[in-house]
Image (spheres, rainbow, N blue to C red):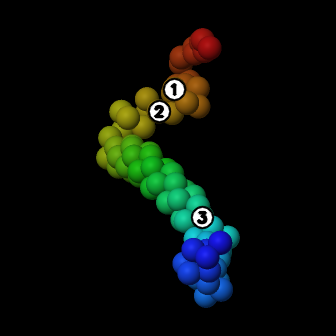
Amino acid sequence: MNWLRRYVSLTLIVVVAFVFFVLFFNDNSILQSFEYNRQIQELKDEIRSNEDTLRYYQELNDRLDTDPETMERIVREQYHMQRPSEDVYVFE
């Protein structure tokens, strides 16, 4: 019991409790930091995915503005439009 009084004091207990509180129960705790980093990584992955999709639609938009054949193909495939003299059959 003598060794306990020599190495453990009230100040040490207060400091250890404070450090423990800051590391695990604070708003900026280590566990919360790991969770935030995981969310940041998920959002970065989502941004990359959305940038790829955005790039695809920008290229498609440019082609629709410049190429009438592309416009006709898109209109026929997606909106089932036809010329007056045509019959269109839709298979799904």
Where disc 2 sits, the SS reads helix
| Residue 25 located left or right of residue 87 | right
Residue type for callout 2: Ile
SS of the residue under disc 1: helix
> How far is the residue under mark 3 from the one under mark 2?
48 Å
Residue hosting label 2 = 74
Circle 1: residue type: Glu
Quick one: label 3 or label 2, which is nearer the N terminus?
3
Residue placed at 65% from the left, 86% from the top?
A: 10
| Residue 23 lies in quadrant | bottom right
What percent of the width, then of the height, locates residue 13? 63, 80
Instruction: Decide if residue 90 is in sight here.
Output: yes
Q: Decide: marks 1, 2 in contact (CB < 8 A)?
A: yes
- Kindly indicate whether the residue at mark 2 contacts the one at mark 3 (C-beta within 8 angstroms): no
Residue denoted by label 1: 77
Q: Residue at x 55, y 30 (%)?
A: 78
From the viewer's perspective, tell me whether residue 84 is left or right of residue 65. right
Q: Determine the image quadrant of residue 16.
A: bottom right
Q: CA distance from mark 1 to mark 2?
A: 5 Å
Amino acid carrying mark 3 in the image: Gln
Label 3 Cα crowd, 10 Å radius (few <14 / some 14-19 / many 20+): some
- Residue 51: give x, y in percent of width and height: 41, 52
The residue mark sitting in front, 3 or 2, is 3
Vertical relation: 90 (above or below) 12: above
Frontmost residue, 4 versus 17: 4
Q: Is residue 82 left or right of residue 27?
A: left
Residue 29 versus residue 81: which sits nearer the camera?
29
Query: Which residue position is annotated with label 3?
Result: 32
